[in-house]
Image (cartoon, rainbow, N blue to C red):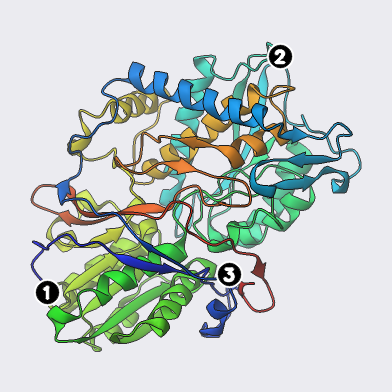
Amino acid sequence: MRSLKLTVVTLTVVLAGASACASDDSEAEPTGGATESTAAATTASTTATTAAAAGAASDSPTSMDEWEALWAEERAAVVAEIQENGWGKTPDGNRLVGPEGFEIDLAACPAGWDDTEGLTDSEILFGLPIAQSGPLAESAGAGRATDAVFRHYSDEGAFTDNTGKTRSITLVQRDDAYDPARTIPLVDELIDSVKVFAVQTHGSPNTLRTYDKLNTRCVPHALPISGHPALGDPVNHPWTTTSSISYATEAVIWGAFFEQRLAELGGRGKIAGLLMNNDFGLSYDAALRAYLETSEGDIEYVSEKFEPTAATVTDEMTTLASEDPDMFIAMSAGSSCAQIMTEAAQNGMHQSVDYLFISSACKAGVPIIDMGSSADGWWSVAGGLKDVLISAYDDDPFVVAARQWTAEAGHEPSPSFNLGLYYSWAIAQGIQIAGQLDGGLTRTNLMLALRSIDMTHPMLLGGLTISMNGNADAYLLEGSDISYWDAAQKTWVQETLVNLDGRTPLCAWDQNTSACA
């Protein structure tokens, strides 16, 4: 593996609304045409930071009191902007209007639709179908983290709206085992029988099978746990928001990272990718292929697929090792991530491949601190998340508080807790903002709050923020660290920080072409 002491560079990244195959069982290879038909590409020079270990000092607040004061100011600013612009329901109640042309046709909602369904004077019902078993069972940790955050803010009385109602969130979780066929009836149960206020789904295949129904039923689909680019569609799917860095953006950053290192590889190089054969993995593959097709570099790309339920990835990893790549990327999630890293250590790729990358989804779920030397030097474009499991953040006030909330809720932290803390904190802020808009907490006010949010997230590395701006910017997070794991120090070492706020094109997903239109 090539030396990790690299000079920090500024990446120039071309973002196009790269696509992914829509079907779990599709064997068709993505084509370049998928991206060529998207919105005009955006070119942006990203910011770069000096290399630093995780947990390095920044200008962030140094106590929870300071954090809470900052968030109160930021929430108030969002409320003020909404009120000053007159955004909200129209007088006839038929439309919701928001920033930059954002609009929801409420007259198209089903007969009997209720803007406050799932609310009582004291409770908010929130639905979360998530993998608690199967290949992504570790993702259940994200659900436990969500429970801890919601419990904390509920106990603090944070969800008091301007009508004087103080509510607590009841989190209704269901196990879908990362199987879209199970997610569909679970979503039906949550919206038809439980009658939840809002739903959060987990996984790209699961989300793409249910987001049409949630939008047709006018149910807030808040921060689904997926980075699929199709979620950036506020025009056709206004009730569904994005949440984390788009997988397409992540893949483009991989390509740019490698392209700028071709000179040290003699002017040409090979990338090998192992991808999960579903909407999630295929979205990475399509975006990377699309980027490389526009690259002027001499780059060969080879890939292998494996099924989400596969017991092992040995054959696929052996095949890719025989290609002698210069860069390897694990486009995976769940238990396969640790298997891939272990296989690389056993088949020689850990020693022979210059740059080994795991996806952001792998980083969020793999127990890397327990993997010893086999994890050393692996890179990730990880969405800028802090890691509550490593000692580098022992002095971070939010991490300390989150660990305490987790213990008080009776949970043990696990790798996917980082994602759960990230998503649930943002949802909790959105609910608080919505409660201060005209009429108090409603489904439409929650959507308006999320489409207007602009806040400093405590789970993100300094320099990254979360924001959306109606139809102009549908992506909550558009930045990431590029970091590698130092096994000896048991920490992620940040090489570069990439920030692309407001530069990711919208994606009107076309099921027929499996592409952004």
Q: Residue at x 69, y 48 (%)?
A: 101
Helix, strand or loop at disc 3? loop
Answer yes or no: do the residues labelled 1 and 3 have beta carbons within 8 Å?
Answer: no
Q: CA distance from mark 2 to mark 3?
A: 42 Å
Tell me if 23 is positioned left or right of 479 in this view.
right
Q: Amino acid at mark 3?
A: Ala
Disc assigned to residue 39? 3
The residue where tag 1 is placed is: 351
Q: Is residue 513 visible?
A: yes
Disc assigned to residue 163? 2
Q: Position of residue 436 (x, y in %)?
A: 63, 21
Q: Nearer the viewer, residue 504 or 282?
A: 504
In the depicted structure, whether residue 78 falls above or below residue 329: above
Quadrant assignment for the N terminus: bottom left
Q: Residue at x 81, y 41 (%)?
A: 95
Q: Amino acid at mark 1?
A: Gln
Q: Which of disc 3 and disc 1 is earlier in sequence?
A: 3
Q: Which of disc 3 and disc 2 is earlier in sequence?
A: 3
Mark 1 vs mark 3, foreground winner is 3
